[in-house]
Image: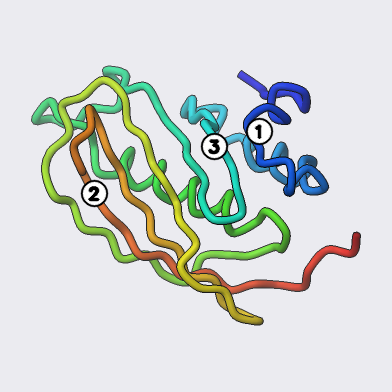
Amino acid sequence: MNMDIEALRGLVDPELHDWLDDILRMCNAPYAIDNKIELVSVSKEAVRMRKEVTPRDLNSNGVVHGAVSFGLIDHAFAVIGNIDTQSVGLSCNIIYHRPCFGSMLEAEARLVNESRTLITVDVSLRSENRLIASASCIGFKGERPKR
């Protein structure tokens, strides 16, 4: 389901409203739409996204597939890394703490550090208030868009 600009406005910290078009583009990326990843909230420091678990998200053991977990982590990282600049992922170190049997996944990406060329983000993935996975992601920043 595509998000529209008015729905997005209510989820984004007002200090980032100059970047609504860029955030909307990330939320409506084909990967996010195809995998039903939804935005919960956005600020300069953190992005929260969630995904309802469906039968197609389970692995052969009946738990959420690692690729599904990583996809949500990576997309939350992408949104926070592309709010006011363009960035691409360089690395992501993920630790799976426990299998996920829950019906909803929620990722929170938090900005740890930003330099002229790099962005470092920690992402936690939870289901039913339990930590499922954590990740440390680094992105390379391109040129800032002109505003």
Q: Nearer the viewer, mark 1 or mark 3?
A: 1
The residue at the point 77 percent across, 23 percent down is 6
- Of mark 2 and mark 1, the one earlier in the sequence is 1
Residue 5: which numbered mark, if any? none
Q: Nearer the viewer, mark 2 or mark 1?
A: 2
For the rendered model, the colour scheme is rainbow
Q: Which residue is mark 2?
A: 133
Mark 3 falls on what kind of element?
A: helix
Q: Quadrant of residue 66?
A: top left
Kind of residue at disc 2: Ala
Q: Which residue is mark 3?
A: 31
Q: Which residue is mark 1?
A: 28
Q: Residues within 10 Å of mark 2 (few under 14, many from 20)?
A: many
Left or right? Give the position of 91 relative to 127: right
Kind of residue at disc 3: Tyr
Q: Residues within 10 Å of mark 3 (few under 14, many from 20)?
A: some
The residue at the point 77 percent across, 27 percent down is 5
In the rendered image, the quadrant that contains the C terminus is bottom right
Q: Quadrant of residue 24?
A: top right
Q: CA distance from mark 2 to mark 3?
A: 21 Å
Mark 1 falls on what kind of element?
A: loop
Kind of residue at disc 1: Asn
